[in-house]
Amino acid sequence: MSRALSIAASGMQAQSLNIDVISNNLANVSTTGFKRSRADFQDLLYQNLRSAGAASTSANQIPTGIQLGQGTRPVATQKIFIQGTYQNTGNELDIAIEGSGFFQIMQPDGEVAYSRAGAFKLNSDGKIVTSDGYPLEPEITVPNNSVSVTIGTDGTVSALAAGATPPTQIGTIELAQFPNQAGLSSIGRNLYLKTAASGEVTTGTAGKDGRGTLSQGNLEMSNVSVVDEMVNMITAQRAYEINSKSIQAADEMLQLANNLKR
Amino acid sequence: MSSEMNGIVLGARSQELRLEVLSNNMANVNTVGFKEDRVFQIPALSLSGDPDIPFASPGELPLDSLAGLPVGTFTNFEQGQLKVTGNALDIGLEGDGFFSVQTPNGVQYTRKGNFELNADGTLVTLEGYPVLGQSGRQIQISGHDVFVDAGGAVSVDGAEVDALKIVNLNKNGLLKKGDSLYSPIDPNDQGSPALNTLVRQGVIEGSNVDSIKMMTEMVDVMRGYESYLKVIQSLNDTNGKAVNDLGRLS
């Protein structure tokens, strides 16, 4: 009986984690470049109270066994890297990646992080930086006297100086790719770090070798769908509730058993 | 204690076991590819008919064991609901087949198709076990576009690399191993190619636990348990009468 209690408790813990993940998805419904997560569960070990197929005598086998599961546990929160919707902003430093690939962002500690959020700005030195002020890697500096910046689909960045034609090329945005992007670890601020699970990074020109192309003046929005998350939340909440019902049932049965002795 | 009491205690404990199995089903109501377990009563006839099956007689049932209960569990392999996710490595099975997975304990089988790639580009389950291809080898995916057709063939960037090894197994002879994995009781059971199973990319198979059915069964368990305890109480009352009132002189 105490087993029923702990089994149901494992179910409640799992669903509570599920709600946490869903809440974080919903909180980031309008975060640029955000990718939703999904909690994944698996059943725990089974206790074989009686093994089916074991020999009861040399000539006979036990036809049916009793297998008792021990509940559930969360195994992973999986990042779902499907494409987010695009929003046209017209802003010349808003860049969306159409297809796979990540921008490379240099963090203050010298480690390169990866991002899908393409809302770049210029800092006081004219460097292209993220909203947090981290520069794009390799660094691209827009000259002071530029009137406009053009970014080609292959990542070529050109600046048009005042009074001069044609525009001059000032750098190239390279995209990074991973064998397993779901294995990247999120560190917040729309940034990901590579891990052993993500595999080694390869970088290269946008549009080549399966890398996506760049689209200037567009932003990739969050890939969270509110309706889907709401449905998931209802499912998770009901699953939580139904597990609490098994705790109630176990409790009531224990109470009945306790009342046997008056 | 009277002998009928033992049978009733067994009945009450069978109901406890039912609740534990129901709780496990409900804990896994959101587990991808989970199949519910059910408890069934072993008919009394088959018990008395085959004295070789070692069910402990009620009198000698050890208190800490449920092994002597006249019940068994089986797994209901009914199809779970397929949910569209759009994720290229979410693969759902429609039909009776199982994915083959290389685990440290040999090849095991699963219905849980939300796969991933590991650092080497090998198709693995979320536990990191490689998913096996038709030839029994691991499936390497290095490329951008992964396409899985209804027969299980895996193409990367337009070139077919391998096909998922989907097998039919004797469902009455499968043991649950946890982690949504199954292993045949008979170690020689390699399964046969599942021809009637459709492979669907971008969907996952949800748990086949029906929460409404679980709730009604739970009511049934509780009331059944209550009835057994009521009978124990009235037997106790009868015994009490026999002990205390019978033979009283006045």
Image: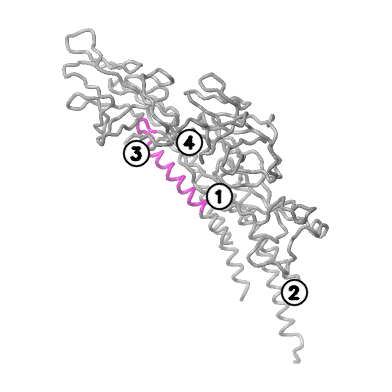
Q: Which mark is residue A187?
A: 3
Toward the viewer: B60 or B221? B60
Q: Amino acid at mark 2?
A: Ser
Quadrant (top left/top right/bottom left/bottom right) for the C terminus of chain B: bottom right
Query: Would residue B25 be found to the left or right of residue A57 on screen?
Result: left
Query: At x 50% / y 52%, what residue is drawn?
Result: A12
User: Marks 4 and 2: which is nearer the front?
Assistant: 2
> Do the dots labelled 3 and 1 sit on one chain?
yes
Indicate the position of residue B6 as horizontal and vertical percent values. Answer: 72, 69
Q: Which residue is mark 1?
A: A44
Q: Nearer the viewer, mark 1 or mark 2?
A: 1
Label 4 crowd bin: few (<14), some (14–19), many (20+), radius 10 Å: few
Vertical order, A18 against A88 (above or below): below
Do marks 1 and 4 share a chain? Answer: yes
The quadrant holding residue B194 is top right
| B233 over B100 or under it: above or below | below
Q: Which residues are magenta?
A: A10-34
* Residue contact at pointers 3 and 1, CB within 8 angstroms: no
Colour mode of the rendering: one colour
Q: Earlier in the sequence, mark 3 or mark 4?
A: 3
For the residues marked 3 and 4, what is the alpha-carbon distance in whole angstroms?
25 Å
Q: What residue is shown with label 2?
A: B2
Asked if B245 appears above or below A18 in the picture, the reply is below
Q: Residue at x 57, y 41 (%)?
A: B103
Tell me, yes or no, whether the two marked residues, 3 and 4, touch with CB atoms within 8 Å.
Answer: no
Label 3 sits on a secondary structure element that is: strand
Q: Which quadrant holds residue A250?
A: bottom right
